[in-house]
Amino acid sequence: MGEATIPHFQHLMAKKLLFLLTLLKILLCGQSKFMVYNTSQGIVPGKLNVHLVAHTHDDVGWLKTVDQYYVGSNNSIQGACVQNVLDSMVHALLADNNRKFIYVEMAFFKRWWRDQSEAVQDVVKKLVSSGQLEFINGAMSMHDEAVTHYIDMIDQTALGHQFLKEEFGVTPRIGWQIDPFGHSAVQAYLLGAEVGFDSLFFGRIDYQDRAKRKKEKSLEVIWQGSKSLGSSAQIFAGAFPENYEPPSGFYFEVNDNSPIVQDNMELFDYNVQERVNDFVAAALSQANITRTNHIMWTMGTDFKYQYAHTWFRQLDKLIHYVNKDGRVNALYSTPSIYTDAKYATNEYWPVKTDDFFPYADRANSYWTGYFTSRPAIKRYVRLMSGYYLAARQLEFFRGRMNSGPNTDSLADALAIAQHHDAVTGTEKQHVANDYSKRLAIGYSEAEELVSSSLACLVESPLLSRCQNPVPKFQQCPLLNISYCPASEVDLVQGKNLVILVYNSLGWWRNEVIRFPVTEANVIVQNSDGQEIESQLLPQAEKHLDLRNYYVKAYVGQAPPKTPKYWLAFTVSVPPLGFSTYTVSTAKRTGSTRSSVATYKSGEKSKFEVGKGNLKLKFSTDQEKCTDYVNIRDMVEEQVELSYLYYSGYNGTNQKDPQNSGAYIFRPNGTYQINHEKKVPLTVLNGPVLDEVHQQINPWIYQITRLYKGKEHVEVEFIVGPIPIEDGIGKEIATQISTTMETNKTFYTDSNGRDFIKRIRDYRTDWDLEVNQPTAGNYYPINLGMYMEDNKTEFSVLVDRAIGGSSLQDGQIELMLHRRLLLDDSKGVAEALNETDCVGGDCRGLTVQGKYYYRINPLGEGAKWRRTFGQEIYSPLLLAFAEKDEKDDWMNSHVLTFSGIDSSYALPDNIAIITLQELEDGKILLRLAHLYEIEEDKDLSVMTTVELKKLFPGKKIKEVKEMNLSANQERTQMEKKRLHWKVEGSSGNRHVSRGGPVDPKELKVELSPMEIRTFIISFDGVSDQLFYAM
């Protein structure tokens, strides 16, 4: 491909030379009417400077898949080809060295870059070094900000930044989040200031907020997104006056209907002065709502510049004639030039805190539906994210291989999935399928890596002894639908099942694991050979229905056998390590079978579940209500769990035609879903856990679980297929109600990181006109939400991104599933009606998921939210192998392993969010403090991590602290940081940060909410890579 491009490039150069010679000849002859436009103008002090930023916004999948967008196929849906954009951009920039262009999405640019010859690559590198081509944002995709987890946001940004550093030696300066549907605090301080960006620009804020900011000239602010890090992580941020497109009348793509600048006086329709007047009028209009004498025009929009010359020809003319006119100054610019110009004015700027959620672009158009849209994909992305974190750890422990399976494919798939029309659920169905396919391919390769790495660690902790490991470990990605062939083996005489349980967190974990088994008469032994307590739970009919239908969808045929039980037992696993357990046929009494009690409709009975401090008390005549009692905390509360649906608004033929759809939540009535009580309530009791099974109606099933030794409640829900036979789309929510007096106030997380205070029907930045009291109070939830009164706090954690609110005092509401029959006219042109087909059996999507709740005394809930929140994100990883009883497995294999010193565990407030071996053998390490200031009386403090104990058996040669995306040293980033002036006294609070790392002590300090990133190199290669216990 590269060689074939060279003749084309040479041809291009020849044409350019011919053009210059011809131009020279004409000029010498004095007969030319050829117009040379003066585009060299820079900033002019004292004038209004209009910074023209040529850009394209290229969605990494939306109406077409990422590859279809790149190559320009499937154009019956949308005529868009990113290859054309990038090809023609290079030609257009070469034609005039004053022209500038910015590019954002590295998922596309990497594809294009690999297709180019060395000659073209050299030309592009020169365009970058000269500043004509500037990379802005520089992440793989323009990630969403509502339903993405902060670890995913970091990973996909770092992946793009790594590419740019390796190929061009550049570090992007500007954040460019122009299309996500609302903007998060984490984006501002973490993916903005902590990355090293000098500014952040975005397009979508609430229409009421925008109107007020225009009047106050406060569209541009200093955004302090973290109350913990304050002004040390602030960033200059700007919202565009309307959107990320040019002013009306200045679109110049082929076939756009804006008037071009017709400057040939010998032709009809000469309009130079008219177009100059239009330009000046639009510039002055924007200047009236903007501080200083600098404004930015975003000259481009979705997939523009496919023939870049059509844009640049008109921009050349506008710059030339506007500057001849002299009323304002027009120039080719970039967001970096614009930011520097703003900074140079020495202006004082208003301060913004918190975030820009929820977003509405008009009265009945709240973009809060996508917080839940496509809940199965949201769960898949979250599962793969936690798996990617664990797989990279194991890749490091084993040693990164030059060939063979790695985590690169999964990294790429996850990066693309963070795009603001991917994990959001706002893409077409065939595109959603493409995202899932990429994740599945990435998982498959990472699964192979994980299995072989675990096999190596089991055989020997010494790297030199691990070549082709013998044990073959299998994993169970379909465990959510009760399908695990590796555990469903017949344990005939002489066969045992080995289970390796890996913990990717930095502290010991004691948790219950469960998997399907066919045998009832089994025992479980730990790595010491001791029999441990275990429990058999019968498979629920609902789980078997899901299993039989979806297994056939995934593997092409129904499973050959049906396991009768779940086997559950408590495991104890060291930090960054594994423990081994075996399941074998019992010679005497085996695993305890759960006792089963059923309660029929109308039967008045009371029962209690829970083995430890936490008890739930039920009364069968009040199936929604539960008495929650924690005897240790002396907390008692009545909790009611109920379900409802919102009918999707049908705006057809209405004065306001806004429908409820993939983006928009616009309810048209609220309908409680009553317990039909046709199916008896079932209670399972045992030594490990208790379960209460309730069939709410034919398409909602609920299981309430309490685990031995745990003080939270797990609620599993199975929702779907949502019925649509009545022609009405439905949005399903659950409400968790208490008697707490919460005064309209609740707290939701920002991308799994900081918690932000919310007040019903209220906005901090403006006087809210309430027109959608339900949709306008919904917020995105990635980790969880909580509410409090003067005695207690009630916390709910979730297993995926979801929408939620507190619409009444003492109540939390979570939207679980959406199935809608109309498009909401926001561009996707498709109803959110997910349907699965297996053979000829087509059904609406069924969603299975979990949420968790706990009630604590006031001020004591953060410990559970932060610790258990990490455990939800990083579930224990299970790997299975069969062994013969004759094999002396216990004495010939490593049974317990920890990658860190056996005497050490990370502090309770610290998590390792990245441990990855880079291609040069160095290690990328990110440590995150999990708490905000004043969040917890014990854990919201400066904390120390000992690097020597994180890497036992290795001699650390150098520890280099980097910015968040690891593309520049932290000290360099801080030296370059712009220090903006703010209005009032905001931002003056002293913020303590962890100090430099002493090269001898090798201890890292972290203050609340601080994330520190290091590249670590070791002295030689130690043979003793791991610390086997």
Image: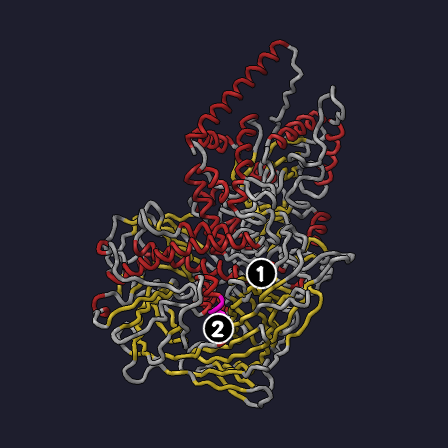
Frontmost residue, 778 versus 228: 778
Q: Is residue 384 above or below residue 303?
A: below
Around disc 2, counting alpha carbons within 10 Å, would you say few (fewer than 14), some (14 to 19), or many (20 or more)?
Answer: some
Q: Is residue 815 above or below residue 256?
A: below
> What is the magenta range?
544-549
- Residue 703 can be seen, yes or no: yes
Q: Is residue 615 left or right of residue 183?
A: left
Q: Which residue is mark 1?
A: 834
Tag 2: residue type? His
Q: Are marks 1 and 2 in contact (CB under 8 Å)?
A: no
Callout 1: SS? loop
Q: Is residue 240 left or right of residue 955?
A: right
- Give how far across and how far down residue 267 sits, in percent: 74, 22
Callout 2: SS? helix
Q: Residue at x 74, y 36 (%)?
A: 281
Question: For residue 600, which quarter of the picture?
Answer: bottom right
Q: Earlier in the sequence, mark 1 or mark 2?
A: 2
- Give how far across and how far down residue 663 sits, in percent: 63, 56
User: What colour-coding does the image apply?
Assistant: secondary structure
- Give how far across and how far down residue 221 sits, in percent: 62, 48
Q: Quadrant of the N terminus?
A: top left
Around disc 1, counting alpha carbons within 10 Å, would you say few (fewer than 14), some (14 to 19), or many (20 or more)?
Answer: some
Tag 1: residue type? Glu
- Magenta span has 836? no
Q: Is residue 485 left or right of residue 467?
A: right
Q: Which residue is mark 2?
A: 543
- Give how far across and how far down residue 751 sits, in percent: 53, 58
Q: Residue at x 31, y 58 (%)?
A: 453
Q: Main secondary structure of the magenta part?
A: helix
